[in-house]
Amino acid sequence: MAKDTKIAGRELKPSTLMMGHGYDPVLSEGSLKPPIFLTSTFAFPSAADGKRHFEGITGKRPGGAEGLVYSRFNAPNQEILEDRLAIWDGAEEALSFSSGMTAICVLMLTYAAQGDVIVHSGPLYAASEGFVAKWLSKFGVAWLDFPAGATRAQIEDVLTKAHAQAAENGGKVCMIYLESPANPTNALVDVEAVKAARDAVLGAQVAEGGSTNQECPIAIDNTFLGPLWARPIDQGADIVVYSLTKYVGGHSDLVAGSIAGAEKWITPVRMLRNTMGGICDPNTAWMLLRSLETVELRMQRAGENAAKVCDYLKAHPKVVGLGYLGMIEDARQQDIYNRHCKGAGSTFSLLLRGGEAECFRFLDSLRIAKLAVSLGGTETLASHPASMTHLSVPDGRKAELGISDNLVRISVGIEDADDLIADFQQALEAV
């Protein structure tokens, strides 16, 4: 870890490190904040340096590039951003991407090969599930899933079936991909149970001589609660995935994504990103550096607002259910929350009495909250997943995952909480 993470033996908090970690003003004419480095290529001090950098970029030498090479590989704004992103999750390294889906696609392509099986939790964001089911399947990659709240025994059962299926096709279980809380139901995944199940099944396979594969990373989309309210690496996840567009960016003015984890997991993904591109652009990286300085403040305020709003909504006669982590009614989900989460977040699902028509009337009547997809911004957003973000999911699959026609997803922002309650009150009156 860089030298500026401690003072007098004290490990500095992420909120402190966001103000300067990974950047030396002396290298940029004393500029307090990093300038935006709008350049495609970088001059090498010598030909020998250029050779050594490319040995790292191409993998001929471990450790990656030791300097700046070309902006498809690395650049100052992106490197500072990645250093700071890794801090939040307690990860060795992080990589930035042009969107959350770019991060997910490059990650899966790195580890999946023909005949392999990806095991994932459900539900997932529709584009994530669609990439596995519609696109990776074209290249001979299959999938099996388990419900978000599954127990260790249930997960082991799915993993055992996945291993058998992969063995028949000459492949392996190449990744366990999780989303917790799940989009849009807010269902939690027991990461500790997933790790225990993976280790048990992999160990048994190796012991029986049926497999030599012990490299099956657990990746998790932590967008809904990270980086403030959940640190999945602490529970056994290997790779943490973000849509930085959401809480980290936090102002609904950029699109980006990231992954973070141990060097052994990140390096292969870096190599594919070097080839394919997809790295975050310097202007977006600079904006994310700005956003990281206030992410803790914004998320705390939004979380406080969500608690007040949900206190009101829970008692409303036209509300038949709330998928809010501060009001969990299921014992299994509460147990996972107690072990995994540091806060309830500010995005939740609202179940209205009725169906699509009632939800549309509610959404169309909102005045402060904006009718838009995405989440985690300073403003409150509301949307109808069944007909919007998850429209491409087959109806039977939506029913199986609990994505019903009477479900509205709400992401509470940092406005005045009483004003938001008044807005939801008058919108519910229109239903």
Image (spheres, rainbow, N blue to C red):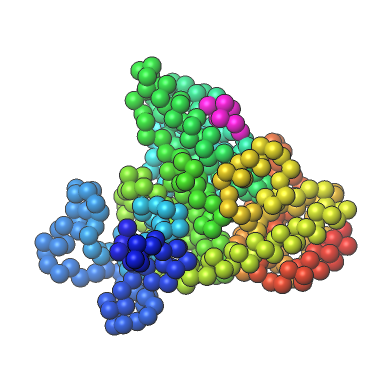
Could you tell me what secondary structure mostly forms the magenta stretch?
Answer: helix
Where residue 297 sits in the image (x, y, percent)? 57, 68
Which image quadrant: the C terminus? bottom right
Q: Residue at x 37, y 75 (%)?
A: 34
Instruction: Count every numbered label the image shows and give the total.
Output: 0
Which image quadrant: the N terminus? bottom left
As drawn, the residue found furthest toward the front would be 8
Where residue 388 sits in the image (x, y, percent)? 68, 53
Where residue 9 sits in the image (x, y, percent)? 34, 62
User: What's drawn in magenta, residue-wise?
Assistant: 150-156
Q: Residue at x 50, y 30 (%)?
A: 197
Q: Is residue 353 left or right of residue 121?
A: right
Magenta highlight on residue 20: no
Q: Residue at x 86, y 53 (%)?
A: 318
Q: Is residue 326 left or right of residue 24?
A: right
- Seen from the viewer's position, the closer of residues 265 and 294 is 294
Magenta highlight on residue 154: yes
Q: Is residue 208 visible?
A: yes
Where residue 50 sits in the image (x, y, percent)? 16, 62
Q: Is residue 249 above or below residue 353?
A: below
- Seen from the viewer's position, the closer of residues 127 and 208 is 208
- Seen from the viewer's position, the closer of residues 82 and 48 is 82
Q: Residue at x 62, y 60 (%)?
A: 375
As drawn, the residue found furthest toward the top would be 208
Q: Is residue 103 visible?
A: no
- Seen from the viewer's position, the closer of residues 137 and 249 is 249
